Image (spheres, rainbow, N blue to C red):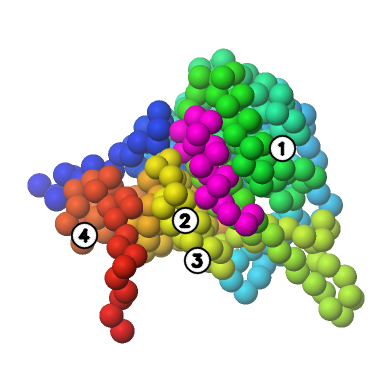
Amino acid sequence: MDPTALTDLSVQIGRLTLPNPIMVASGTFGYAREMANLVDCSRLGGILPKTITAEPRVGNAPWRTVETSAGLLNSIGLDNDGIDAFLSHHLPYLASIGTAIVVSIAGRTEDEFVELARRIGETGLASAVELNVSCPNVSGGVDFGTDPQACHRLVAATRKGCDLPILAKLTPNVTRIADVASAAADAGADGVCLINTVLGMAVDWRRRRPMLGNVMGGLSGPAIKPVALRCVQQVRSASSVPIVGIGGIATIDDVMEFLVTGATAVQIGTANYYDPQVSTRLIDQLPAALQELQATSVREVVGTLDSTRRVDT
């Protein structure tokens, strides 16, 4: 028998059970229809479609994306079809795929978040909701993710109004991310997603203008992986809340670094743009990587980093 068949890839994030820890990040996978001819979406640990708001949004003025030397700047501005179109058109399709669907939502107010989560929960078609309290590309997009007390109130209210598991996606653009994560955990979050993009900008010096229409945007990709790992380590050291790692993940080494540092699962984001099949390939590679650590399950390696030791040089 193939020894990889004996490996248990399933993970538990609070009340959310996933068949494996490889998810795709919101905003990088469309509504999954766009990827159906390229990826066997049913194999993914979970899918996060584009962030949904109460009303349709056209997003920010162009340019919306700019490539950098080690990543991607984006200022999309939560362009989406709105909750009504999502519930009637997108969610039924997503639910038919056969894997966990974690719906990312963003609201302008606490009540708006709660109402969005309530409506999604009532469909019975979603596995969980992700509270996007960390988008740097819209006015007020990080308000709930930079203030621990505001984050606590939002998570508590959403948990009260919705029976689904709740993940809080946090911004690194704060002084102490562990404080915000602990507040989310204390309010009942099933997990926290670390991290959303790092605030940045690009400049056309010849025209003396910013390149993004919104001036600033969110940096993703390989450039932010060290920042994301740092955030995972800090939150893991301060709280027992399950963590979903996000930021520059493209190889099996990246995945294992996040797992060992303390992430229970990961989301693949920017890499989907240039390598749409990266997520399923990582699932295939995961059993062998676990075996290198003499582990037969993902759970055995999560958070096993020994920070007192250094790699020999």
Q: Label for residue 226? A: 3
The numbered mark, 2 or 1, whose residue comes first in the sequence reads 1
Residue drawn at 47 percent across, 56 percent down: 234
The numbered mark, 4 or 3, whose residue comes first in the sequence reads 3
- Callout 2 amino acid: Gln
Q: Which residue is mark 2?
A: 234
- Callout 4 amino acid: Leu
Residue drawn at 37 percent across, 61 percent down: 257
Q: Which residue is mark 4?
A: 293
Q: Cα distance, mark 1 to mark 3?
A: 30 Å
* Residue 182 picture location, percent across and down: 51, 42
User: Of circles 2 and 1, which is in front?
Assistant: 2
Residue drawn at 87 percent across, 70 percent down: 209
Image quadrant where residue 220 sits: bottom right
The numbered mark, 1 or 3, whose residue comes first in the sequence reads 1
Q: Residue 59 or 228: which is nearer the viewer?
A: 228
Q: Which residues are magenta?
A: 174-191
Q: Cα distance, mark 4 to mark 1?
A: 42 Å
Q: Cα distance, mark 4 to mark 2?
A: 23 Å
* Disc 3 residue crowd, few under 14, some 14–19, many 20+, Cα 10 Å: few
Q: Cα distance, mark 3 to mark 2?
A: 12 Å
Q: Which residue is mark 1?
A: 80
User: Of circles 4 and 1, which is in front?
Assistant: 4
Q: Cα distance, mark 2 to mark 1?
A: 33 Å
Image quadrant where residue 46 sits: top left
* Residue 271 picture location, percent across and down: 52, 58
Q: Cα distance, mark 4 to mark 3?
A: 22 Å
